[in-house]
Image (cartoon, rainbow, N blue to C red):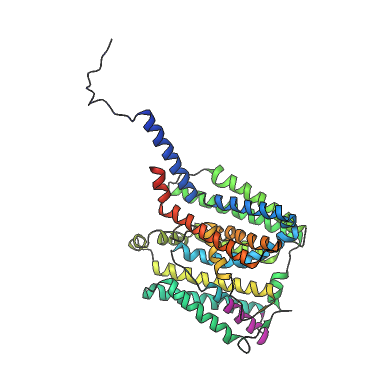
Amino acid sequence: MTTSNKSPAEAPSSPPPLVARVEGRQSRRRMALEAIAGRYRFVPVVLMLAVIWAFFTAQDSAFLGNRNITNLLVQIVVTATIALGIVFVLLLAEIDLSVAANSGAAAALTAILVVNHAWPTWLGLLVGIAAGAAVGLIQGAIVTQFGVPSFVVTLGAQLMLLGGILVLLPGGTGQVSLFGTGIATLSSTYLPPALGWALMAAGIATFVLLRLLSLGESRRRGINTSVVRDVVVPGILVGAASITAVAVLNSYLGVPLPVVILFALLAVFSYITTQTRFGLHLYAVGANPDAARRAGIPVARAKMIAFSLAGALAALGGILAASRLLGVSASSGTGTVLLESIAAAVIGGTSLFGGRGSVWDALLGALVIGSISNGLDLIGAETVVKYVAEGSILVLAATVDSILTRGSLFARAAK
């Protein structure tokens, strides 16, 4: 028989079983919340989208019909394109309140050049997008060089751009018709079924390639990764969704050209934000600008490029909107364009506090906003209902973002 010579004070201490179980539950809860705040932030958005689609399908079975799905996707292109630019600015913990007015001014400039001055369509498009980018670049320069808060600079720019639209239009409040021009064909072009399937296959291959590149980059940084979790499962889900979407669209008129443009933009900017030094700088500056500056990252240049991209994408969104409406007027870039664009980026999962988000958030958020608007129109709801619904979801998304980003929920989980 052996006995221990250690006194009770010298024996290794271990938490009582009840305390250990409580600490284990708190740890698992904290890990789950951190996953929702980071890698799986899209999950609540997808669930919300499923609930919205189920609700409106129950109200009207035509909601998920091929005609309405085509209309829905065409409708969200403008919001998603402008929201894509907003994502870049939000990643840096800044804001651009001029994107809607910038979109209207760029569309008016393009229409004037193409219709009134007979410029080639491609040249008018380039000048319009370049003008939008220049507006963003000037705003970024004022924000970074003079330290003026971005919401003040862009709010002032919004008013100036709305005035610029009135100057550009004939008679101040006139309209410019785009009927019969090359700009009008942008939104009225549908791809042949075979071309739609080919582009879908290329899109899925691009998505998988981007996931593989991201996986390799994460492994080089020593981050825990999994081929099944990070590449195979997302690839299967995106592939299934893409095949379903193209099949539905081909059963009506085909894949709309604006949808192809949107997904091409998402693929390009997904590569830029995940595989380039500029993308790394965006997240670093947004997470901690002082630390990024000490690390030698050109903070001012990153912000100016982000504002310029937001301006260029706003201009493209405005031109696509004009193409769909077959003209520009004094109301171009007004209404709910600004609210829906910012709401799409935030609802999709991009944080208002910087450093968190993805370009795909613009697509998810635009789908949520567009589905609500489309569904309410389909069931004949009043405009006030649409405003209340969209505003409520924006406030809810911002509240969830604040809770997840600032960690108040984590603190409760640790108690």
Q: How many marks?
A: 0
In the image, what residue occupies the spot 62% across and 64% down? 386
Which image quarter: residue 359?
A: bottom right
The image shows residue 199 at horizontal and vertical percentages of 68, 58
Q: Position of residue 43 (x, y in %)?
A: 56, 49
Residue shown at 52%/74% (left/top)? 133
Is 96 in the magenta?
Answer: no
Q: Quadrant of residue 145?
A: bottom left
For the stretch drawn in magenta, what is the main secondary structure? helix
Residue that sits furthest to the top in the current view: 1
User: Can residue 388 be seen?
Assistant: yes
Viewer-closest of 37 and 1:
37
- Seen in the picture, residue 173 relative to 78 is either above or below; the reply is below
Q: Check the picture and name the quadrant holding the N terminus.
A: top left
Which quadrant of the figure has residue 343?
bottom right
**Viewer-closest of 63 and 262:** 63
Q: Position of residue 258 (x, y in %)?
A: 66, 66
The quarter of the picture where the C terminus appears is: top left
Residue pictured at 59% horizontal, 60% vertical: 363
Which is more toward the observer, 389 or 88? 389
The percent position of residue 73, horizontal first and vertical second, equals: 67, 62
The residue lying at 62 percent from left, 61 percent from top is: 263
Q: Magenta stretch: give its range.
A: 104-120
Residue 273 shown left or right of residue 376 in the figure: left
Q: Is residue 350 visible?
A: no
* Residue 220 vertical position relative to residue 263 in the rendered view, above or below: above
Residue 116 inside the magenta-drawn segment: yes
Query: Is 292 or 329 nearer to us in this picture?
Result: 329
